[in-house]
Image (cartoon, helix red, strand yellow):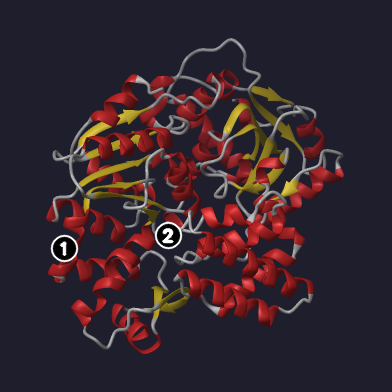
Amino acid sequence: MLSPIQKEIVELPGNLIVRASAGTGKTHTMVSKIEYDIAHCHTHKAVAAITFTIKAAAEIKDRLTIDTSNHFIGTNNSFAIEEIIKPFMKDVFGRAYKLDMSTDYSVKVKTFAEGLVKIKDEQILCSYANSRENFIFQLALEILQKSKACQLYLKAKYFKIYVDEYQDCDKDMHALFMYICESLNIDTFVVGDEKQSIYMWRGAYPKAFMSIWDREDFSKKFMRDNFRSCQQIQNYSNLLCDETRDLYKTVDDLASVIVICTTRSNWVTSVTQHLDPNKKCALLRYSKANAEADAKALSDGDMEFTYIPQTPISEITTDTAWLYNAIAKYFILPKYSAYDFRDEIPNEVVGNKKILNYIKKSLSLLDECIKQEDISVFVKRVEVIADYLGYDTKEEHCKKVYETICDPKFHPAFNMDELKRIAITFHSSKGLEFEQVVLFVSDYRLSSEEDVYNHYVASTRAKTKLILVYVNGDWNAGQFAKNINNILGKSGLKMKDVATIVNCTECISD
């Protein structure tokens, strides 16, 4: 079912920008719109659904009830690389540039010219040393602007592109997408939430998203109703930001948002007595070290929490990343079979029995390598599988797959859904939801726009209970107290008006 605003969004033609606050059903709306647009396009052309993560792309693909074989559903980088750079590199820069280049973001260059040399001499598509600049998208735009063949290809293939989480786009991504919209006249749908921009440290530019909001050639819709969190948690998160402050609704019961004032030595006991042991809970911290240490502290305090680490393969973003993840899942998850592996292959080979038999045999050979602890042969066999399926791979990436499989500490990252209580970074929590969420206010001083956005994202992961831990004497916690009271004061409120405060001995309730 679609809400009235969702139905309007789905049926609106042309360019469209949607601001979607946390918990408003953004993915459901986007999937519904893609299906509606395809059903009503009256053309042979395809769509491109572009996301930031492989996981998000997979979710969209899984939710679509239509045949996706002719459409592009993948990440920003894979779109730029596979649809623009690789096919048309030679068209702009000449035959010296080979098309079988690999992507390695660990290789850093300082200038555009240096990046071109890496491609020409070593067939490596790399990244800038300055994380606020994006070599891949600068290169893609250069090719698109200069290659008539590339322009004609995209215009002939796509009638619409959809860009998810647009607030996380950097300036170079924004330039490419707007060129496609303006110069190629391909309808563009963008959805995002400037309040959930938590990647400004690596170049995200939420002002680009809001600049589209000001354009006359884009229709505009705002999804504000949070269907995930209870009203009190909604109240708290909405009060953080100017654009949602008017959504505040008075509630009688303040038990869903709890501020616990405690000490460094006693915080575990203080927190656990307010948690429902039968409901899923996530502790979200800014740093991986704190998340891991706090998970241990909670577990030592008789309430087991599992730290969810980043795996060696989690930051691999090449178009072969799906293969590495599929291999890892096969050996880590008991219920993940060769059939599941086959279904994840991007190319449409689901009905090919030969492919399935090949996968079964290949996975069996990999199993032998793992049992024999033979990493060198394991790497070679992964390379063979990748080559058979039409993908490039790198030795160091294959070694990371082996490490991920063989080290049990990485396994929880693959079965998070089965764990009742976890500890992760709040950056990793984006897109997830939990009945209960625990935050340390010292992670969010609220002294900058980025701090506020980070706190908004973390807070809106909670459905029924949000616990804010205030450690007495912590300077960062003191900064949070000062700034949250200033923010709430804009609405004539104090923390005691929106939360239950436990054991307050400092200024958090002022």
Q: Residues within 10 Å of mark 1 (few under 14, many from 20)?
A: some
- Residue under label 1, please give it: 151
Which mark sits nearer the N-terminus, 2 or 1?
Answer: 1
Compared with 412, 34 (above or below) is: above
- Residue 462 visible, this orientation: yes
Q: What residue type is labelled 1?
A: Gln
Can you tell which mark lies on residue 10?
none
Compared with 330, 374 (above or below) is: below
- Residue under label 2, please give it: 347
Q: Where is residue 80 in the image (x, y as percent from the top left)?
A: 32, 63
Of residues 458 and 126, which is closer to you in this image? 126
SS label for mark 2: loop
Say which quadrant the N terminus sits in: top left
Q: Residue drawn at (24%, 33%), measured in percent from left and top?
A: 220
Q: Residue drawn at (53%, 59%), measured in percent from left and top?
A: 353
Q: Position of residue 110 (x, y in %)?
A: 37, 79
Of residues 218 and 475, which is closer to you in this image? 218
Say which quadrant the C terminus sits in: top right
3D distance between C-alphas at marks 2 and 1: 24 Å
Of residues 307 and 32, which is closer to you in this image? 32
Q: In this view, does 98 lie to the left or right of 127?
A: left
Q: What residue type is labelled 2?
A: Asn
Q: Position of residue 464 (x, y in %)?
A: 62, 25
Q: How crowded is mark 2: few (under 14 residues within 10 Å), some or many (20 or more)?
A: few
SS label for mark 1: helix
